[in-house]
Image (cartoon, helix red, strand yellow):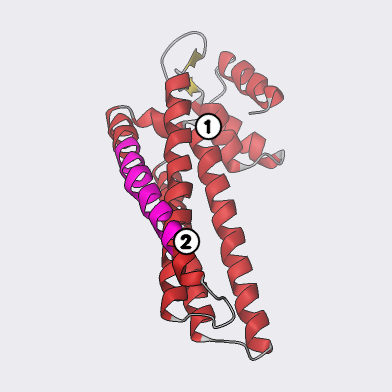
Amino acid sequence: MSNELQSFVKESLEKNVPRARIQDVLKKAGWKPDEVRNALDAYADADFPVPVPRRKPYMSAREAFMYLVMFLTLYWTSFSFGQLIYQFINRAYPDPLQYGYIDSSFQTIRMDTASIIIAFPVFLYVSWVLGKAMKKDPEKRASKIRKWLTYLTLFIAAGIIIGDLIALVFNALGGELTPRFLLKVLTVGAIAGSIFGFYLIELRKEEKDA
């Protein structure tokens, strides 16, 4: 939040200027509605001689650790699951030029399976703990690290989806749409699309409730 905006709102409230009037003037001055709303929401609408600041959400090191673990295990699980599906596709539609590939794929399948067995339960548990904490204290939804990591996840997922579509169109133009390639494109699109859709809905729901 801009210090200039915060100072203006505080001084206006100190002079008993109505909130609606402050909001009106700031909008006319070019400030965005959400910026104005956040600046006004920083102070409680209380009958007191001076503006009463609202309690700001505090982000502890534990909270940051939990979110980092949650998103790390999400990425790890998603990548391992995609790799695992890739191996099954390669085995169903083997490339005759890749001699001995089937034998080497067993190692990859074992590693991906092990990764999912460990990372996915950790992701579910940490998500459950954080979800429980947010139900108990809704202010935790305003966590900055949570929003930053969520938007980072949306960015990564969007980039993967775009790259996936580019690869699809590129191969389609070259007449190289084999079942093996199409299944891999669908796998990547389904995983990235599911993650993107879930977190986008979560963010929109929060913005609507704000």
**Does residue 51 appear left or right of residue 168 in this picture?**
left
Among numbered discs 1 and 2, the one appearing first in the sequence? 2
How far across and how far down the image is residue 153, in percent? 53, 48
Q: Residues within 10 Å of mark 1 (few under 14, many from 20)?
A: some
Image depth: mark 1 or mark 2 in front: 2
Q: Residue at x 42, y 39 (%)?
A: 70
Q: Nearer the viewer, residue 189 or 51?
A: 189
Start-end of magenta stretch: 106-126
Q: Which residue is mark 1?
A: 144
Q: Which label sits on residue 83?
A: 2
Type of amino acid at the residue the image marks with label 2: Gln
Tell me the residue at 65%/74% (across/down): 166
In the image, is residue 37 above or below residue 113?
above
Seen at 49% across and 8% down, the residue is: 49
Q: Name the foreground residue: 191 vs 29.
A: 191
The residue carrying pointer 2 sits among few (fewer than 14), some (14 to 19) or many (20 or more) residues within 10 Å by Cα, namely: many
| Secondary-structure class at tag 1 | helix
Give the quadrant of residue 110: bottom left
Q: Is residue 201 visible?
A: no
Predominant secondary structure in magenta? Answer: helix
Query: Label 1 is placed on what type of residue?
Result: Lys
Q: Is residue 112 magenta?
A: yes
- Direction from residue 37 to residue 191 in the image, left or right: left
Nearer to us in this view, 102 or 62: 102
Q: Is residue 72 left or right of residue 171?
A: left
